[in-house]
Structure formats: C-alpha cells, structure tokens
C-alpha cells in the first residue's frame, strides 16, 4: 500500500497494490493495520455509495460541521471523477486552497479527506459509482454545503453547467457562513 501526501496538510492518496492475472485483479481495499503503521489511525462509522447516471453530475461542496465533522476515504467503483477537497480550517497555512485529483475505476487510488475540508466531485463519465467511508455517521443538523462555483475558491471543475441537486444549486458562498472550523473546533467535538 502506497501513501502519497498531497500539498494540503492531511490530504493524501492511498494506493492499494493490485495483483492481476488472466482473470482480472485483486486488491486489499482497506487495511487498518497497514494504515495505522503509516500514521493513519482511522475509525469509520458509515459507508456511503453514490451513483450518477450522467457525466457532469456535481456533488458538493459538502461537509458536516463540528461536533459531527467527518473524515472521508473516497474511491471510484465505476467511471471517473474529478474529486476536490478545500481546506477550511481557520488558521491553517493552506486555508482556502484546494486540491483536485482524478479518481477512476482503473486506478486503485483513494483520496483521504480529513475533517476540516469541504469535499465534492464531478463525474467525468456516465454511470459513475463513488464509495466513501466516513469517520462519523450522517447528522442532518450538521450537514452543510458551499457553492460549487464560489469565486473565492477558484475551482476549475472543467464545466460551466453541471447537473446539480436543488440543495447544491442554492448553496451559499463560504464567506457568507460562519467559519465552520474556527480555532478550537476540535475541542468542541
């Protein structure tokens, strides 16, 4: 298992080894002991699966506010996505910056998105399924979203008219909401 740190502190790509032969391939998709040995001691409470029928479907930017903040381990089962994480941790040296990575069914890479980040993705292919493990169960009262096209974030999704839910289409800009991960947020968990 290979772990590649990304340019925003805490974000990383996790690549399990794939072992293939004439039948196809096998991979160990998740190994708590291997990740613990690499410094990622994670406990998950819920697994989520999304299916998007059309390419250009955008889901995000989502997060759960403290004390129900979630870390997410994101992988693509079928299709492909451009996956985006935005650092919104107050006081972080990379606050307001984002990372975008391509995840697809042909690459075993998973994106680890820790608490304190907005998360979203746009499908690059029709019939895309995304699986993600989360460190906290879904909490409707802590569910929040930020506008996918917030000009202050400057994310290039590669499209101008995505397929959106009503919730995502009406999401506010980040600057129009209270700082979700202000100093001391971890103590309030």
Image: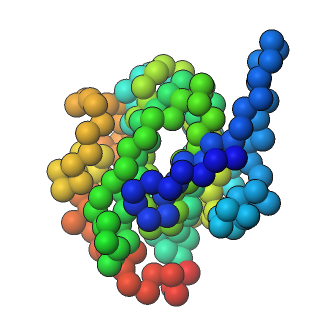
Residue at 73% x, 64% y: name it.
Answer: 37
Residue 112 lies, in percent from the top left, at: 55, 54
The residue sitting at the left extreme is 151
Residue 50 shows in this picture: yes
Residue 92: name its quadrant.
bottom left
Residue 6 lies, in percent from the top left, at: 45, 54
Residue 179: name its quadrant.
bottom left
Residue at 23% x, 58% y: name it.
Answer: 173
The C terminus: image quadrant = bottom right
Residue 115 falls left or right of residue 166: right
Q: How many numbered circles does the render carry?
A: 0
Residue 19 falls left or right of residue 7: right
Residue at 74% x, 48% y: name it.
Answer: 30
Residue 177 lies, in percent from the top left, at: 27, 68
Residue 17 lies, in percent from the top left, at: 71, 38
Residue 43, compared with residue 184, is above or below; it is above
């Amino acid at each position: 298992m290979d772990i590649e740190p990304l340019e925003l502190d805490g974000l990383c790509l996790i690549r399990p080894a794939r072992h293939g032969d004439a039948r196809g391939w096998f991979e160990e998709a998740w190994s708590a002991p291997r990740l613990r040995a690499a410094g990622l001691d994670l406990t998950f409470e819920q697994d989520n699966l999304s299916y998007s029928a059309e390419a250009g479907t955008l889901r995000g930017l989502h997060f759960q506010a403290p004390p129900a903040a979630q870390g997410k381990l994101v992988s693509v089962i079928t299709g492909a996505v451009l996956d985006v994480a935005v650092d919104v941790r107050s006081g972080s040296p990379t606050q307001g910056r984002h990372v975008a990575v391509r995840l697809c069914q042909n690459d075993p890479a998973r994106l680890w998105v820790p608490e304190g980040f907005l998360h979203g993705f746009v499908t690059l292919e029709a019939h895309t399924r995304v699986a993600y493990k989360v460190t906290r169960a879904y909490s409707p009262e802590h569910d929040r979203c930020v506008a996918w096209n917030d000009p202050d974030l400057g994310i290039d999704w590669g499209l101008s008219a995505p397929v959106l839910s009503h919730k995502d289409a009406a999401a506010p800009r980040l600057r129009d909401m209270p700082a979700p991960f202000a100093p001391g947020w971890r103590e309030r968990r």
